[in-house]
Image (cartoon, coloured by chain):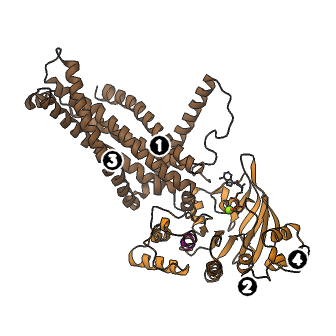
Amino acid sequence: MSNGSMEVEGAPAAGVERPSGFFVTLGGAALDFIREAGAGGILFWRGLLSMGRLPRSLPLVFEQMRRIGVESLPLVIITSIFTGAVTAVQAAYQLREFVPEQYIGTAIYKSVTIELGPVLTALVVGCRVSASIAAELGTMRVTEQVDAMEAMAIDPVRYLAMPRIVAGLIMLPIVTVFADALAIGGGFVVSNASLGISPSTFVNGMKMYFFAGDVFGGLIKAFVFGGIITLMGCLAGFRTSGGAVGVGQAATRAVVASCVLILVSDYVLATLLFKIIFG
Amino acid sequence: MAARPVVEVRGLWKSFGDKEALRGVDLKLHDGETLVVLGPSGCGKSVLLKHVIGLMEPDRGSIIVEGRDLSGLSQAELNEIRQKFGMVFQGAALFDSMTVGDNVALPLREHRGMKGERLSALVEEKLELVGLKGISSLRPAELSGGMKKRVALARAIALDPDIILYDEPTTGLDPVMAEQINELIRSTQRKLNASSIVVTHDLHSACFTGDMVALMDEGRIAFYGTTDELTTTENEAVRNFIARGHPAATGAPGGSGAGPACADDPFA
Ligand SMILES: Nc1ncnc2c1ncn2[C@@H]1O[C@H](COP(=O)(O)OP(=O)(O)OP(=O)(O)O)[C@@H](O)[C@H]1O
Ligand SMILES: [Mg+2]
């Protein structure tokens, strides 16, 4: 690879014999993580630089929006309805005898918009999307399609990575809005049907402590998660080496990295948004 | 033949781990010339081509294209130079998420901003050149290996490049098709006045398409000369290569010069 394009020959530490031992393993893992994060940063930066060509790449972005957003909807519909339903049951159980039942509505709406909607959507969509991006780009890498693209002077970061990342940033908040609505709907139905909470009580509970920042903060989270998912997929894909086995490993690595980073950044964002900005 | 080489490879070394793929390759491609690179499997031919187009970075040595050293270039400058190139990959490397037509159209769309009727007409024209009229709506997965190779060739010449790199363009094709591709390489070279590097195992194809021949062996150039010289040389590596791969072409073993490599047509 040349001049600032992705270094793929020799995946990190491949074939290097490491001494064993707990701390050595831990240190090695930490180094790999830093290397991985560095490569992710570089890829993100190059993706940003290629945004200048965004207008020309719009058809590619739309195609990815369809694949990331629209095709994820069935999965999101199921997970979010049940998330809402189970939240209602669990909230009712935990709050029973302590808190008036109208707070069930508050609890559901707050937990869904702030945390459950964005995070569960990101995890579910993330597994699906980052694995598929990594497998697709990884296959292109090992069959020399990425090389062929570079050879014809088309930047793979602009043509392959950037449209996916942009689509992730746009679609995750949109899908999350859907998920929020469906989860609250699921909670509403369950509260009504099996917990005996009347619709007006539920809605009053929601209205009482409504704060637009909750929804907004959740959507900011979703935006960041959308970037993480697609970035990790592209990164693992571009760094694939070693045939079909390598493609499988890339998909796994993308999913693991997305899930871990979603949860870690969720903590960071929660602190930033709800303690510092809205707090 | 102009004096200034279009592509010059100087002292190129490359290893993967402790495997040395290239061990000091020096090579020149002159303007309008077709250079054939022969060599046994695994001697570093494909790695050499990838260096020429800047897909790999040398450990040592340099690649100079039209007077500019690739290693000193920014990504933008490198891409500018790459637009002068067309490359046929050994495994075709077609974009399998796109149709055949889109594969050929991609460089035209991206670099010439072409679209609509004009684009599809040109794509069809390029496909016709490689004998694949009317398949532009198929997917690469629906093609045979030889058809993929030919689509890759059509894609490589889409931009009418100055320098064309062919990595085993005729491997896996039947003799008739191979002959057509050889013809195509020659006619493209004449029409575009392109300079080409053709990597091949096929002596006949080498003699037919080539002006100059280089024989690679274990990461080095073992022989470099004209196609005529190839037939007369006493060079050990050349005789060995010819004897090993094409016993018929050398005539009786030991009878050097008895059956010159290029005079004998394997398909005759
Ligand atoms: N990306 C890579 N990583 C590690 N080793 C490589 C890589 N590419 C090539 N090699 C090694 O470099 C050597 C030369 O490979 P190359 O593909 O250039 O051979 P070749 O001459 O093209 O052979 P063939 O005629 O079979 O295509 C081989 O030993 C190969 O194992
Ligand atoms: Mg090869």
Q: Earlier in the sequence, mark 1 or mark 3?
A: 3
Question: Horizontal and vertical percent for residue A134?
Answer: 48, 48
The picture's colour for chain A is: brown
Q: CA distance from mark 2 to mark 1?
A: 56 Å
Chain that appears orange: B
Q: Which residue is mark 3?
A: A72
Residue A54, percent across and down? Answer: 40, 57
4 and 3 marks in contact (CB < 8 Å): no
A168 sits to left or right of B240: left
- State the residue at coordinates (41%, 54%): A163
Please say if the residues under marks 1 and 4 sit with CB atoms less than 8 Å apart. Answer: no
Dots 1 and 3 on the same chain: yes
Amino acid type of the residue tagged 3 in the rendering? Ser
Residue occupying image coordinates x 69% and y 34%: A17
- Between the residue at mark 1 and the residue at mark 3, the CA separation in whole angstroms equals 18 Å
Percent coordinates x, y for residue A97 in the rendering: 16, 14
Mark 2–mark 3 CB contact (< 8 Å): no
Q: Secondary structure at mark 4?
A: loop
- For the residues labelled 4 and 3, the Cα–Cα distance comes to 68 Å
- Residue B128 in the image: state x and y as whole percent: 51, 81
- Helix, strand or loop under label 2: loop
Position of A25 relative to B133 (above/below): above
Which labelled disc corresponds to residue A232?
1
Q: Which residue is mark 2?
A: B268
